[in-house]
């Protein structure tokens, strides 16, 4: 059994330590057996989100999800365990409803070890909340756990493993796309009566003005940067599902691999005008003459809404210059939402520059947990999950057909060329392609 740890100062430095050296029987070890649920991770994924958890681990307290025990041979002030999304099997429990063998979805350590949780029943059957004292500093979404029905705890069945891996890759980012479309850019005129009773939610999920005009995409040019990334693809799926009257005038997706995504709208039968272009096309539009490129609306849109999912260096600046060049007379209102970041380890100078750009351009940060919390407060847990479930199921049913290029890259365990260790190296170097999904078998699911 092993644990993957990352340097808090330089996230490109990482190592594997044996679990036996920690001097504990589990991570987050709890001594009260009546409230303890002990689990073992079986399938987790690694994505660019994990780089964000390391980069923001101190400020946003992600290091506190699974702190290194004080008995460990390394300094917990300098090293930390990066959490990851996926599934774990209950191995010990005295909690009714969580018998040994139960499969749980949630937030786990990048480690192949037993983990202790203190879980209390959530608002709905099968939903649980982690309530131990150290976890209270985390945003709420990271303390929610759900029982995964219809799959046996052995997780050795190939089809079960494939299903779990696909969910581990997409379920976290799917919720971001869903919340943006359903609650931030809400559709009062065309959505259900349930949502017509609430105001749209600010992208941070905080009590700051976010009017119906802010949320309205009709008449807008909607642009996605780094559009072939997983979160951006989920958002695009939601956009293509929007009903007439709530659609933007055009949806432009900018990516290094436009061929991967340019046919999704037509596959879905969407009537939304859209184009997928490359970063090279963006640069070309800046150097061309005054004729409006075919991927931009000829007439000036009411506003331009840009969602930056982690566009390449200078791509946002280039895009803003293109917009200014081709709509010079009547500049449209501009809104920039920061959703993700590039797949790389940011140096301190880059982080400072990014922060300065954020302020200068008036970007708005997206906080998935904050939006979710606001939605739960507005309509209640029952209504929230009942409206979410069929949308998630519908996406699951069609996801493989609209993303046939995505291939799962399986790994086993923590150390070595096929383990989490090598996956982190590839992520930190920006080597994981848009068509790859890194997933890892651990515990009873591992082939090691």
Image (cartoon, rainbow, N blue to C red):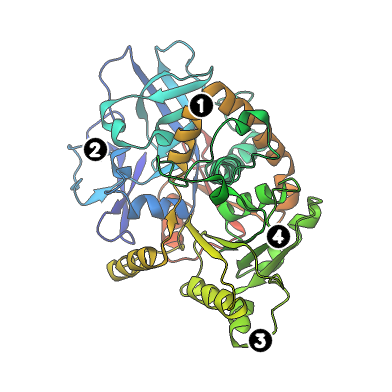
Q: Nearer the viewer, residue 121 or 210?
A: 210
| Residue 283 position in % (x across, y down) | 58, 81
Closer to the camera: disc 4 or disc 1? 4
Closer to us: mark 3 or mark 1?
3
Pick whichever of labels 4 and 2 is earlier in the sequence: 2
Whether residue 299 sits left or right of residue 169 in the image: it is: right
Q: Is any atom of residue 186 visible in this view?
A: yes
What residue is shown with label 1? 146
Q: Secondary structure at mark 4?
A: loop
| Measured Cα–Cα span from mark 1 to mark 2 | 29 Å
Please tell me which residue is depicted at 54% across the width and 40% down the height of the picture.
200
Say which of marks 4 and 2 sits in front.
Answer: 4
Which comes sooner in the sequence, label 4 or label 1? 1
Judge by depth and name the residue closer to the eye, 298 or 8: 298
**Which of disc 3 and disc 4 is earlier in sequence?**
4
Give the x, y percent position of residue 369: 44, 39
Callout 2: SS: helix
Q: How many marks?
A: 4
The disc at residue 249 is 4
Q: Are marks 3 and 1 in contact (CB under 8 Å)?
A: no
**Above/below status of 116 relative to 45:** above
State the separation of the CA atoms marked 3 and 1. 54 Å
Marks 3,2: beta carbons within 8 A: no
Residue in the picture at 73% in, 75% down: 294
Q: Nearer the viewer, residue 250 or 395?
A: 250
Secondary structure of the residue carrying tag 1 is strand
- Give the labeled residue for mark 3: 290
Q: First in sequence, mark 1 or 2: give its number.
A: 2
The span from disc 4 to disc 3 (Cα, nearest Å) is 21 Å
Q: Which mark is residue 22?
A: 2
């Amino acid at each position: 059994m092993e644990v993957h740890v990352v340097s808090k100062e330089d996230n490109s430095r990482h190592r594997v330590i044996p679990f036996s050296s920690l001097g504990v029987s589990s991570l987050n070890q709890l001594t009260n057996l009546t409230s303890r649920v002990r689990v073992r991770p079986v399938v987790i994924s690694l994505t660019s989100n994990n780089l964000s958890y390391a980069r923001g681990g101190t400020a946003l307290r992600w290091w506190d999800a699974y702190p290194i025990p004080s008995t460990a041979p390394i300094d917990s002030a300098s090293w930390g365990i990066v959490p990851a999304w996926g599934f774990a099997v209950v191995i010990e429990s005295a909690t009714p409803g969580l018998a040994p063998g139960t499969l749980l979805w949630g937030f786990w350590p990048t480690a192949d070890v037993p983990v202790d949780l203190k879980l209390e029943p959530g608002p709905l059957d099968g939903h649980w909340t982690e309530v131990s004292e150290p976890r209270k500093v985390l945003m709420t979404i990271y303390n929610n756990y759900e029982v995964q029905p219809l799959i046996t705890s052995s997780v050795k069945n190939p089809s079960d493993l494939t299903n779990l891996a696909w969910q581990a890759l997409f379920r976290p980012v799917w919720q971001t796309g869903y919340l943006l479309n359903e609650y931030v850019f809400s559709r009062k005129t065309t959505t259900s009566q349930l949502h017509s009773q609430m105001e749209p939610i600010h992208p941070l999920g905080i009590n700051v003005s976010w009017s119906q005009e802010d949320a309205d995409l009709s008449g807008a040019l909607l642009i996605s940067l780094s559009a072939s990334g997983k979160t951006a693809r989920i958002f695009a799926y939601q956009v293509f599902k929007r009903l007439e009257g709530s659609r933007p005038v055009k949806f432009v997706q900018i990516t290094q691999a436009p061929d991967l995504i340019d046919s999704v709208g037509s596959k879905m039968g969407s009537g939304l005008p859209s184009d997928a272009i490359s970063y090279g096309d963006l640069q070309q539009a800046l150097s061309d003459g005054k004729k409006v490129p075919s991927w931009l609306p000829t007439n000036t849109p009411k506003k331009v809404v840009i969602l930056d999912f982690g566009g390449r260096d200078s791509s946002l600046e280039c895009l803003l210059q293109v917009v200014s060049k081709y709509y010079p007379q009547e500049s449209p209102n501009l809104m920039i939402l920061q959703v993700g970041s590039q797949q790389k380890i940011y140096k301190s100078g880059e982080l400072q520059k990014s922060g300065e750009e954020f302020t200068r351009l008036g970007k708005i940060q997206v906080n998935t947990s904050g939006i979710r919390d606001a939605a739960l407060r507005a309509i209640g847990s029952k209504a929230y999950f009942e409206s979410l479930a069929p949308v998630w199921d519908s996406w699951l049913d069609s996801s493989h057909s609209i993303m046939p290029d995505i291939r799962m890259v399986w790994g086993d365990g923590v150390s070595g060329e096929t383990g989490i260790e090598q996956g982190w190296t590839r992520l930190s170097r920006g080597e994981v392609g848009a068509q790859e999904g890194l997933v890892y078998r651990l515990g009873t699911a591992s082939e090691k």
